[in-house]
Amino acid sequence: MNLNLLLRNCRLFADLDTTELTTINAMAHRKEFAKGETIFAEGDPSRGFYLVVAGAVKIYRIGPDGKERVLHVVEANDSFAEAALFMDAYPANAEAIAPTTVIAVDRLQFRQLLVRDPKLSFKIMGALVKWMAQLRNALTDVSTKEVPARFASYVLSLPEPLTVTMSKTTIAQMLGTTKETFSRVLHRFARHRILTFRGKQLRILNRARLEKVAAGEEKI
């Protein structure tokens, strides 16, 4: 597939024209990672940021208690490690949680491009602001909503078809809960005939009720 098309599919570059995409194309390259392979570790020198073409990547840190804290899960058409453009080292770990293809964009070349092209800089900043707003909403969900509402919000954010690339353990970590609690929540969704989750396939049985759960208007 044409690299320009892959770049355009990424939300970060959705507003760029063909000339701008071609310029970024020259500083980008594809990389493949196996499931469980580390893309970068916390403290590694910053080399650039990444766009997920296929698969999924979890961004996490290890807490003082030695437990893993999942900060974000990045799936196809999303980017990660943008903050590393302005940092000397990566502030967290990134690991492929499925066979994953990414486009790596070189840090130094991309920063030089932003300096040379203010119009492009504003487009990128606009996309980053939108992404930050989405991340803020996700963090608000984790801190204020109950687990069923968090999961309902996550499901409603997924594109069709509803195929999940991450494990249920990773989803539980992302939602800020345990795998056992998440399993009980899934059972309640199925019992209320709102959705089912078998293997990697999610099936929404009642979207209206799922939206009410996500908004906190219905408890299950």
Image: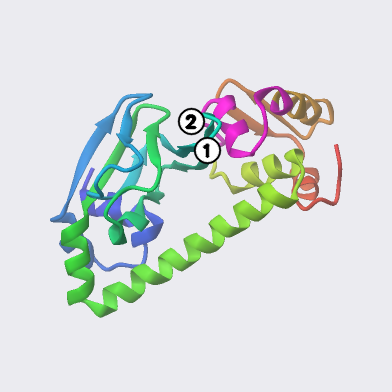
**Kind of residue at disc 2:** Thr
**Kind of residue at disc 1:** Val
Is residue 55 visible to us here? no
Who is closer to the viewer here, 29 or 83? 83
Give left or right: position of 155 versus 5: right
| The N terminus: image quadrant | top left
Who is closer to the viewer here, 4 or 68? 68
Give left or right: position of 156 versus 92: right
| The C terminus: image quadrant | top right
Local crowd at mark 2 within 10 Å, few (<14), some, or many (≥20)? Answer: many
Label 1 residue SS: strand
Who is closer to the viewer here, 111 or 124? 111
**Residue 26 appears in which quarter of the rendering?**
bottom left
Residue behind mark 1: 70
Query: What's the magenta region?
Result: 161-182
Residue behind mark 2: 165
Label 2 residue SS: loop
Q: CA distance from mark 1 to mark 2?
A: 15 Å
Q: Does 189 appear above or below 22? A: above
Q: Where does the image place residue 213, in percent across and percent down from the top left?
A: 79, 45
In reply to whether residue 60 is colored magenta, the answer given is no
Local crowd at mark 1 within 10 Å, few (<14), some, or many (≥20)? Answer: many
Disc 1 or 2, which lies upstream in sequence? Answer: 1
Q: Where does the image place residue 43, in percent across and percent down from the top left?
A: 32, 43
Q: Residue at x 46, y 38 (%)?
A: 60
In reply to whether residue 171 is colored magenta, the answer given is yes
Q: Nearer the viewer, mark 1 or mark 2?
A: 1
Q: Where does the image place residue 44, in percent across and percent down from the top left?
A: 27, 42
